[in-house]
Amino acid sequence: MSQDIIADTLNQIMNAKRAGKDEIIVKKHSKLLLELLKLAKKEKYIEDIKVEDRELKIKFGNLNECKAIKPRFNVNVEEIEDKIKRFLPAKNFGVLVLTTDKGLITHIEAYEKNIGGQLLAYFY
């Protein structure tokens, strides 16, 4: 495992999904990963998240793919459209997750609030 907990967890989710599983248990997690998963849960890509005995149990929802974006590009509102074309398969299909000084938000919220940030991950 590398030092990037978010990328490792999202890779574990995709590997388990390809193997036909519907949940995983992650031993290493962080506050940022929990916030990312809560945002994915709000968007219905993750069904349930439980923290038990220093382990994180993640149950998948309506998820096709999720990946961390590396390097974490800095984007402003005008550049988000280019990144949507690059990372998402269709215009209104999936979400880009940005980290801002206001916390983690989706690209849709970034448009509404007219703020940019760093790209963290995407879900569809």
Image (cartoon, rainbow, N blue to C red):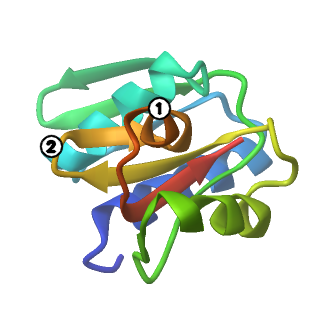
How many numbered markers are drawn?
Answer: 2
Give the x, y percent position of residue 78. 55, 63
Q: Which residue is mark 1?
A: 112
Q: Residues within 10 Å of mark 1 (few under 14, many from 20)?
A: few
Q: What residue sits 53% from the left and 44% below the top?
A: 107
Q: What residue sits 58% from the left and 52% below the top?
A: 122
Q: Marks 1 and 2: which is nearer the front?
A: 1
Location of residue 67 with respect to 27 vertically, above or below? below
Q: What residue sits 30% from the left and 19% below the top?
A: 50
Residue 47 showing in the rendered view: no
Q: Residue 3 shows which numbered tag? A: none
User: Which residue type does callout 2 highlight?
Assistant: Lys
Name of the residue lying farthest toward the right: 90
Tell me: 86 left or right of 26: right
Q: Which residue is mark 2?
A: 31
Give the x, y percent position of residue 63. 71, 33
Q: Residues within 10 Å of mark 2 (few under 14, many from 20)?
A: few
Q: Earlier in the sequence, mark 1 or mark 2?
A: 2
Give the x, y percent position of residue 75. 44, 69
Residue 78 showing in the rendered view: yes
Location of residue 57 with respect to 103 vertically, above or below? above
User: Which residue type does callout 1 highlight?
Assistant: Glu
Give the x, y percent position of residue 62. 72, 23
Q: Nearer the viewer, residue 93 or 11?
A: 93
Tell me: 108 left or right of 90: left
